[in-house]
Image: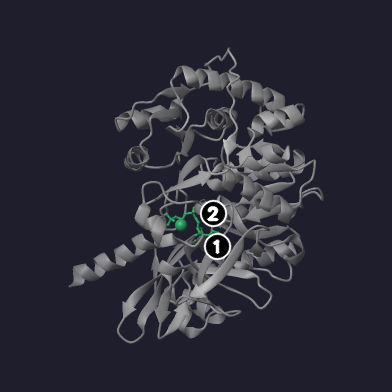
Amino acid sequence: MEQYIPNWLKQRAELTPMRLAIKTKTREITYEQLYEKVQQRVNYFSTKNIKKGQHVAVLMKNSIEMIETLHALFAIGAIAVLLNTRLSKQELAWQISDVEATHIICHEELEPKLIEVGKEVTIVINEKITLHEKSNAIHGYTFDQVATIMYTSGTTGNPKGVMQTFGNHWSSAIGSALNLGLQMNDRWLLAVPLFHISGLSILIRSVIYGTSIVLHERFDAKSMNEAIVKEEVTIVSVVTTMLQQMLEDLGSKQYPASFRCMLAGGGPVPKPLLVECLHRQIPVYQTYGMTETASQIATLAPEYCLEKLGSAGKPLFSCDIKVEKDGRECSSNEEGEILVKGPNVTKGYWKRHDATADSLSNGWFHTGDIGFKDEDGFLFVLDRRSDLIISGGENVYPAEIEAVLLSHPLVIDAGVIGVKDLKWGEVPHAFIVSKEQVSKEEMLDFCTNSLASYKVPKEITSMDELPRNSSNKLLRRLLKEMIKDKTDDKN
Ligand code: ATP
Ligand code: MG
């Protein structure tokens, strides 16, 4: 029989109605109030013919209205397709068509973008809409039911629509609590986008745990630091660039003792940055996860953050991770592809049967990332398989070289790719963005001090900006194309 879960917001509002659900800069809302609003939105959406099983595209910025919208779609059983507000018009049009959305819900200020690409918006959300009637048709879920479709960031190729079930989200939230622990007074600062799994998973955890969210519309280092100090925030989710800016803004100040941790994910965190946090007594736990695992699949447990600095930890309680090479499991410290398994892993990509079959076999999801487990079973994520450079038979990971380049005081961004080389097969080529001009010789000297000679870039190109996607992830494939175009021009 299919496993049933009661509607989690209804349940939460019945269990602890007076607890604070969300706090923004201007508003506070309890679970009872949130549930009431969601019931009204369910009624309103039903009058717009939104029904169970339909794909409803949501293009909204972080806000209480977005949270109400998502809960209302869950209660109807419609599948929320979360769209990145930073997508280009063409990307938006493509995702909406690819997912076969029957309705589009968007914030008023984002509507012109959709109209320009000829998409008809079903519901425009602004603060003027007054909702009256409440609906009692609030439905629970089954584990296998798709709750959300979220496109991958498109870092390695075209984005793919990941189907995330209620069971995936539920298991992810429980796994996280079993690792990080749960406190009645937990307040998770949500400043990453809700349309990414990093943001959505904070929302889902809060309602399942009965804890509060401090919601920011967008990332701003100063506001985040202020919230940690003044709003009694206990946990915050960050990516590397956020962490760097927060440290800079914090200066010599300290976070209060009630602050539990920064959960850092989305990409590799350079080791020098982790060391700096350690010296400044800022608790940072690295986590490894992806859209396909509905957030974390591995996270370093608090007690190991010193001893295993740089590791993404061990699998969450109900998950499993193995590292494979040529179809066999690697031994300790041997590098290979990371495979993951667990109740939070997607059942597949929307309409992409080939991609699903390529990445899922016997319940194991092939991540396309390379890493290793050390002798104690701790996972170290190295880089994406597609970006690996093999130079003179040695594996070279762009992320390691980028971390070294970024530790130079004048370098603000760095990207590394492999280029063809007659002698070595491939050699690293670096691209940097710097505050002021730095000579190639100086950068090479700097790299030689920290890297083995075969990892030192053979070429360094200065740029004004590096190509990044709408999730702010470095697009190494575009750097490769640039080099290829140059070589083609010469021929
Ligand atoms: P696409 O799949 O379309 O190429 P994407 O993989 O960037 O895009 P996401 O699901 O947003 O889309 O990102 C997940 C990826 O981010 C992981 O597969 C991994 O490559 C990287 N990542 C996440 N956490 C870490 C980490 N702790 N260390 C290194 N890389 C990480
Ligand atoms: Mg991916």
Q: Residues within 10 Å of mark 2 (few under 14, many from 20)?
A: many
Residue 64: % across, % down: 60, 29
Residue 465 in view here: no
Q: Nearer the viewer, residue 175 or 384?
A: 175
- 375, above or below 22, in the image: below
Residue positioned 57% across, 69% down in the render: 322
- Please state which amino acid type lies under the numbered disc 1: Val
Query: What residue is rendered at 48% in x and 35% in y?
Result: 79
In percent of the image, x 68 and y 64: which residue is there? 276
Which corner quadrant of the image does residue 313 belong to? Answer: bottom right
In this rendering, position of residue 351 left or right of residue 435: left
Q: Considering depth in this image, is 1 or 10 the residue closer to the camera?
A: 1
Q: Which amino acid type is marked by label 2?
A: Val
* Residue at which label 2 appears: 345
Q: Are marks 2 and 1 in contact (CB under 8 Å)?
A: yes
Q: Residue at 62% across / 68% down in the picture?
A: 272
Q: Quadrant of the C terminus?
A: bottom left
Foreground of the two, 187 or 407: 187
The colour scheme used here is one colour
Crowding at label 1, few (<14), some or many (≥20) Cα neighbours within 10 Å? Answer: many
Does the residue tagged 1 have its C-beta within 8 Å of any atom of ligand 1? no
Q: Indicate the secondary structure of the residue bearing disc 1.
A: strand
Circle number at residue 340: 1
Q: Label 2 to label 1, Cα distance in Å?
A: 8 Å
Give residue 289's position: percent from left, percent from top.
56, 57
* Position of residue 450 measured from the top left corner of the image (x, y, whole percent): 56, 79
Q: Where is residue 51 shown, x and y percent of the image? A: 46, 26
Q: Looking at the image, is 372 positioned above or below residue 55?
A: below
